[in-house]
Image (cartoon, rainbow, N blue to C red):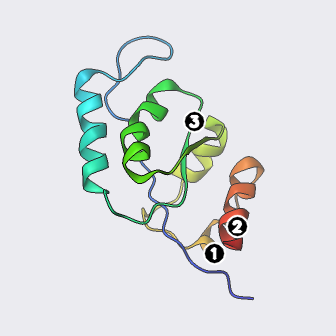
Amino acid sequence: MNPKPCTMIVLRHAEKGIGADPDLTEQGRQRARDLSQLLKGAPIHRMYCTEYIRTRQTLEPLSEISGTGIETISAEDAKALSRCESVGLSLEGLDHLSGEAAEELSRCRAD
């Protein structure tokens, strides 16, 4: 069986405030809204954020526009994802992942 390739876009959160787990700044909120407009109409099947508020806030406008919910994965699994060298990735290139990220990607392969 040949897995169906999909594209994964890895983003860093928008501008954040100060503190241990800060909200986005107004500039960060605007950047998140701009991102949602840029990707409006794109076929988005899954969105992931870490447990940090700023990562969820970055995706919320896009989630509202696309109707796609945001799933939370641990920051450790997100670090594994961010080590990939390109933005557009075929799933075949991600077999080295473990934990929650690997489980999520396996589900994507099954779709």
Q: Which residue bears the numbered disc 3?
A: 50
Q: Secondary structure at mark 2?
A: loop
Q: Quadrant of residue 18?
A: top left
Residue beneath the point at 48% across and 33% down = 56
Measure the alpha-carbon separation of dots 3 and 1: 23 Å
What amino acid is at disc 3?
Thr
Q: Residue 92 got which mark?
A: 1
Quadrant location, the N terminus: bottom right
Residue 22: which disc? none
Q: Position of residue 86 (x, y in %)?
A: 44, 64
Toward the viewer: 12 or 31? 31
User: Could you tell me the amino acid type at mark 2?
Assistant: Asp
Q: Nearer the viewer, residue 84 or 35?
A: 35
Q: Do callouts 3 and 1 mark residues in contact (Cβ within 8 Å)? A: no
Marks 1 and 2: CB-CB under 8 Å? yes
Q: Which residue is mark 2?
A: 95
